[in-house]
Image (spheres, grey):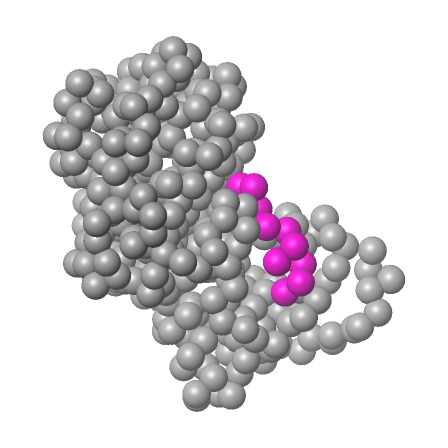
C-alpha cells in the first residue's frame, strides 16, 4: 500500500471489483480533500460511490434518476470551487447526459471527475440499453476532457488518485466488476498520458485498453510458447491525451499493429491509434478489433468478448492472421513521409 493509499492489499484486489476499489479510494481521498463531493443519479450502490456517501453524508448528493440534472449540478458545484466526482453508468454519462457533459462541464473546462461504470459490454446481460460501446468515440471528441480506461482494479485506484492532479474534467471508464487482475501492485509507474509496455516484443504489437489488456497479456504468453512469436503488448490506459511516442516506436520496431477494445471499432481506441500512425506518414500492417459497427449481442461479458474476438482466443487468432500477411517491411521511411 502506497503512502496515503487505501487499506487493502493485492490479495484483497482479487476479491474487489474496479467499482469497489474506486469507492474505497474516493473515500480515502475524501479524508485529505474536503473539497471533494460525490454525486449519483440513484445508482450509489451499483457504482459504489455510496461508500463515499456513507462516510461523508453532508458531501454526497443523490439527484434521483435525472442524469442531465446530475451533470448540471456537478458543473455548479465545480464553479463554486468544489471537486465533484460524478458516478453513473457509462451509457448514461456519455449519451443521456451528453450535451450537459459537453456544454456545462467540458466547454467551461470545469474540474469535474466522471467515473463511468459498466463500460463496454461489461453489463452484457442487461441488454443493448445498458451496453456502452460508443462512449469512447463520443467523449474523446470533447475538448478539455481527459479520457482514461483502466485495465483492472489496481489501475483504477491509480487513475482515481491521479485525476486529482488534473485541473479540468476527467472521464474514467471502468467495468461492472469481475474484471481479472492485470497488475501485481500499484507501483508500476502509472502516469496519465503515458502508456505501459506490458510485454516486450519484436514481431508484432498488440495495443489494448480496459479488459482487453489482460487477454492480450495472456495471448502473448501462449503465442510465444506455441508459435515462437515475440508479441509486444501495450496498455494504452489513457485514450486522451494519447501516448504518440510509444505507438510510433512500436510501428518502427514491429511494423505490425493490432488494437483490441470492448467498444465499437469506429471512433474508439483503434481509431485513436490509427490517427497517430496516419499523421506520422509511416506505413505498417494495421488492424483494429472490437465490435464491428453493430449493437452487441446480449449475454455474459465473457461470451460477448469471445464472440467478437476480443478475448485471449480471438487475439491469438488475429495475431496469427496478421503475421501471415505478405507485408514488406521496408526500412527506408523517406518515401513514406
Closer-to-camera residue (61/5)? 5
Q: Can I make out residue 292 in this image?
A: no
Q: Is residue 331 left or right of residue 211?
A: right
Q: Is residue 46 left or right of residue 33?
A: left
Q: Is residue 312 left or right of residue 44?
A: right
Residue visible at 61% across and 58% down in the picture: 246
Figure disc tally: 0
**Image location of residue 251, percent across then percent down:** 66, 64
**Image location of residue 59, percent across then percent down:** 22, 20
Quarter of the figure that contains the N terminus: bottom left
Q: Can I make out residue 21 in this image?
A: yes
Does the magenta run of residues contain 313?
Answer: no
The quadrant where residue 84 appears? top left
**Image location of residue 73, percent across then percent down:** 31, 14
Residue 208, above or below 222: above
**Image location of residue 79, percent across then percent down:** 41, 12
Looking at the rendering, the stretch of residues picked out in magenta corresponds to: 239-250
Closer-to-camera residue (327/247)? 247
Residue, far right: 334
Residue visible at 54% across and 28% down in the picture: 144
Amino acid at each position: 500500500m502506497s503512502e496515503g493509499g487505501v487499506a487493502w492489499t493485492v490479495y484483497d484486489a482479487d476479491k474487489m471489483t474496479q467499482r469497489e476499489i474506486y469507492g474505497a479510494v474516493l473515500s480515502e481521498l475524501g479524508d485529505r480533500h474536503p473539497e471533494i463531493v460525490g454525486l449519483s443519479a440513484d445508482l450509489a450502490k451499483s457504482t459504489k460511490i455510496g461508500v463515499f456517501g456513507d462516510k461523508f453524508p453532508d458531501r454526497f448528493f443523490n439527484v434521483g434518476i435525472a442524469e442531465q440534472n446530475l451533470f448540471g449540478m456537478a458543473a455548479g458545484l465545480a464553479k463554486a470551487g468544489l471537486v465533484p466526482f460524478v458516478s453513473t453508468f457509462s451509457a448514461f454519462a456519455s449519451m443521456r447526459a451528453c450535451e450537459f457533459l459537453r456544454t456545462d462541464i467540458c466547454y467551461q473546462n470545469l474540474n469535474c471527475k466522471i467515473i463511468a461504470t459498466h463500460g463496454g459490454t461489461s453489463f452484457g446481460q442487461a441488454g443493448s440499453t445498458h451496453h456502452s460501446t460508443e462512449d469512447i468515440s463520443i467523449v474523446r471528441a470533447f475538448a478539455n476532457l481527459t479520457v482514461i480506461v483502466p485495465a483492472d482494479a489496481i489501475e483504477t485506484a491509480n487513475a482515481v488518485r491521479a485525476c486529482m492532479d488534473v485541473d479540468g474534467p476527467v472521464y474514467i471508464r471502468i467495468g461492472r466488476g469481475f474484471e481479472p487482475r492485470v497488475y501485481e501492485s500499484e507501483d508500476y509507474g502509472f502516469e496519465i498520458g503515458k502508456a505501459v509496455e506490458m510485454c516486450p516484443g519484436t514481431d508484432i504489437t498488440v495495443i489494448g485498453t480496459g479488459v482487453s489488456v489482460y487477454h492480450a497479456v495472456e495471448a502473448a504468453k501462449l503465442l510465444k510458447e506455441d508459435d515462437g512469436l515475440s508479441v509486444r503488448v501495450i496498455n494504452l490506459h489513457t485514450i486522451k491525451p494519447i501516448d504518440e511516442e510509444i505507438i510510433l516506436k512500436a510501428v518502427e520496431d514491429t511494423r505490425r499493429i493490432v488494437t483490441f477494445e470492448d467498444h465499437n471499432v469506429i471512433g474508439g481506441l483503434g481509431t485513436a491509434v490509427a490517427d497517430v500512425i496516419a499523421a506520422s506518414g509511416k506505413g505498417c500492417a494495421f488492424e483494429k478489433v472490437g465490435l464491428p459497427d453493430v449493437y452487441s449481442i446480449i449475454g455474459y461479458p465473457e461470451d460477448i468478448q469471445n464472440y467478437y474476438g476480443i478475448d485471449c482466443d480471438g487475439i491469438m487468432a488475429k495475431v496469427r492472421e496478421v503475421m501471415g500477411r505478405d507485408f514488406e517491411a521496408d526500412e527506408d521511411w523517406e518515401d513514406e513521409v
